Image (cartoon, grey):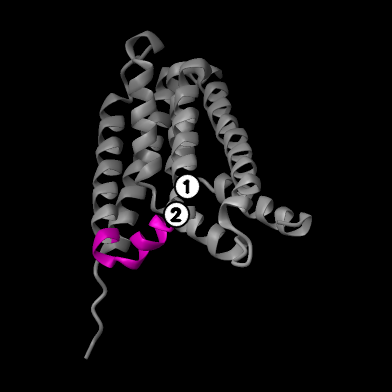
Amino acid sequence: MDFESWTIFALFWIVFVTTPGPNAVNCISNGMTYGFRHASWGIFAVMCQATLFLILSALGVTALLLASPTAFFWAKIIGAGFLIYLGIKGWINAGKVITARETKSKSIFWRSFMIAVINAKSVAGYMAAFSQFVRTDVPVWDQMWVIMPTALSISVLVYAGYTALGVWMGRMAFGMILHKQFRRVMAVCFVVYGVILGGTSAPQFSRS
C-alpha cells in the first residue's frame, strides 16, 4: 500500500470508527459507570473484535456471510434482540448506583465484545475496507501488515476517547437526576439501534 492509498484508508477508518454506534454508546456508558480503569476492558474487547474481523475479512469469511442472506438475516436478528435487551436492562438499572467493585472486569469485557461482534456496521465497514483498499495483485497478508496496525491504532484512540468522555461526563456536577436521565438516554440508544437493526433485517418482497 503506497502512502496515498494508506492516507485514504486512514481517513476512511477515522470516519468509520468515529461515527456514533453501539460501540461508542457502550464506551461512554462504561466510562460513566465504572471509571476509565475498569472501562478500559471494554476498549480491549472492541480491539479483540476488530482484530478478529480483520483476520476474518482477510480470509473471506465476512464476504461469505454477506453472500448468504439467510445467515446474515439471523445474525442481525440475534444482534437486534441483544441490543434491545441491553437497552431495557440499562433503563431499569439507570437509577441504581453501580460501583466498579460490583462489576467483574470479565463481565465488562464479554458484554462489550458481544456488542461489537453483533454490530452490523462493523461487518459492512470491514467489507468496504477490503473491497476498496486491498489490492488484488498483492498478497493479502502482505497488505495486512499495514492495514491492521493502522486500523487498530485509530480504533483504540477513538474508543479510548469515547470512554474518557463518559468518565468526564460522569464526574461533572450533573447531580443524580441528570446522571440517571443520561444513562436512560444511553439505554434508549441501544433499543433504537436494535430496532433499526431488526428493521433492516426484514425480508424484502418484490411486488409482482
Residue 46 in sight here: yes
Q: Which mark is residue 55?
A: 1
Q: Which residues are magenta?
A: 60-72
| 127 relative to 158, above or below | below
In this rendering, is residue 158 above or below 205?
A: above
Which image quarter: residue 177?
top left
Q: Which of the 4 quarters of the picture holds residue 180? A: top left
Q: Position of residue 179 (x, y in %)?
A: 44, 23
Residue lying at the far bottom in this picture: please name it.
208
Quadrant of residue 114 within the rendered picture: top left
Q: Nearer the viewer, residue 190 or 110?
A: 110
Q: Nearer the viewer, residue 16 or 55?
A: 55
Between 148 and 30, the residue placed more toward the observer is 148
Report which residue position mark 2 lands on: 59
Identify the residue at horizontal 23%, vertical 56% (top origin): 74
Residue 63 placed where, x, y %?
Answer: 41, 62
Picture coordinates of residue 25, whole percent (x, y): 45, 37
Q: Quadrant of the N terminus?
A: bottom right
Question: Which residue is depicted at the point 25% across and 28% down?
Answer: 92
